[in-house]
Image (spheres, rainbow, N blue to C red):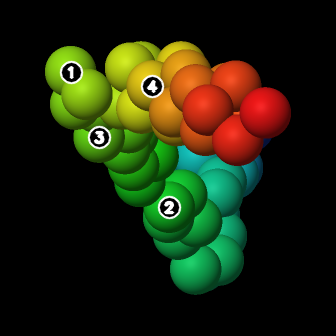
Amino acid sequence: MKKIVLAVAITAIAATATYAGGMAEPVMEAPVIVEQAASSSAGGLLLPLLLLVLVAAAVANN
């Protein structure tokens, strides 16, 4: 009798482990894309130079 109970218990444990997880579709996360900003050495100087030209034009016009 003990052997039958042991066989049923082992079968129940094996069947539970077999169905663990199910047949769900795997979830794939989208890859993270890191984009670096394009920078140039003239980018930081463009606005001050434009402002200087505008001030010089305003002074020359007076």
Q: Nearer the viewer, residue 51 or 62?
A: 62
Check disc 2 and give the amino acid type. Answer: Ala
Check disc 1 and give the amino acid type. Answer: Ser
Q: Label 2's element?
A: loop
What residue is at 45 percent from the left and 25 percent from the top? 49
Q: Residues within 10 Å of mark 4 (few under 14, many from 20)?
A: few
C-alpha distance separating marks 4 and 1: 13 Å
Q: Can I make out residue 4 in this image? A: no
Residue that carries the numbered disc 4 in the rendered image: 49
Foreground label between 2 and 4: 4
Q: Label 3's element?
A: loop
Residue that carries the numbered disc 3 in the rendered image: 38
C-alpha distance separating marks 2 and 4: 43 Å
What residue is at 25 percent from the left and 28 percent from the top? 42
Check disc 4 and give the amino acid type. Answer: Leu
Q: Quadrant of the C terminus?
A: top right
Q: Residues within 10 Å of mark 2 (few under 14, many from 20)?
A: few
C-alpha distance separating marks 3 and 4: 20 Å
What residue is at 61 percent from the left and 32 percent from the top? 60
Rendering coords of residue 39 (x, y %)? 28, 32
Q: Quadrant of the N terminus?
A: top right
Q: Compare marks 3 and 2 and give the one earlier in the sequence.
A: 2
Residue that carries the numbered disc 2 in the rendered image: 30
